[in-house]
């Protein structure tokens, strides 16, 4: 079953290759969507794909790449809209 997760990652997540690493992980898992930095220092992302793979992406984001210091990940589940065909850094 395909699902959609909207996440907001808080902590030291900018300037540590968080978006790049997340894109690599998403591509390995055939996840589509996007990720971007926010002005307040957080990172926001949309993941769409098989439920287990989306959960694995969320787990990855709870840790992030080696230089990241993730404090919190907020997740909102929703319906897949099918708009995305790849995973992009915005």
Image (spheres, helix red, strand yellow):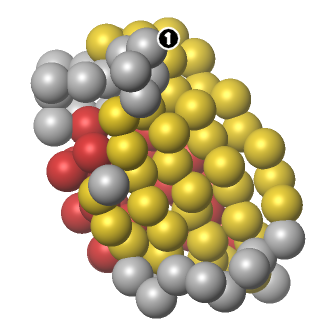
Q: Which residue is drawn at 66% across and 49% down?
A: 6
Q: Which residue is drawn at 51% across and 48% down?
A: 45
Dot 1: within a 10 Å radius of its alpha carbon, few (fewer than 14), some, or many (20 or more) residues? few
Q: Which residue in the protein does label 1 denote?
A: 71
Relative vertical location of residue 10 with respect to residue 23 in this rendering, above or below: above
Query: What is the count of numbered marks?
Result: 1
Is residue 59 visible to us here? Answer: no
Quadrant showing the C terminus:
bottom left
Q: Nearer the viewer, residue 38 or 5?
A: 38
Relative vertical location of residue 25 with respect to residue 29 in this rendering, above or below: above
Q: Which of 12 and 56 is in front in this view?
A: 12
Q: Residue at x 84, y 71 (%)?
A: 79
Q: Residue 43: x and y, percent?
A: 43, 32
Q: In this view, does 36 lie to the left or right of 58?
A: left
Q: Residue 25: x and y, percent?
A: 32, 61
Q: Residue 61: x and y, percent?
A: 45, 38
Q: Is residue 12 left or right of residue 11?
A: left
Q: Residue 9: x and y, percent?
A: 51, 28
Secondary element at tag 1: strand
Quarter occupied by residue 34: bottom left
Is residue 7 visible to us here? Answer: yes
Quarter occupied by residue 89: bottom left
Quadrant showing the N terminus:
bottom right
């Amino acid at each position: 079953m395909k699902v959609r997760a909207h996440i907001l990652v808080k902590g030291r997540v900018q300037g540590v290759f968080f978006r790049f690493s997340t894109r690599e992980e998403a591509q390995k898992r055939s996840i589509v969507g996007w990720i971007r930095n926010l002005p307040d220092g957080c990172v926001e992302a949309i993941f769409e794909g098989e439920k287990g793979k989306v959960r694995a992406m969320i787990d990855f984001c709870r840790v992030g790449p080696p230089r990241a210091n993730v404090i919190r990940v907020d997740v909102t589940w929703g319906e897949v809209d099918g708009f995305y065909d790849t995973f992009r850094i915005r």
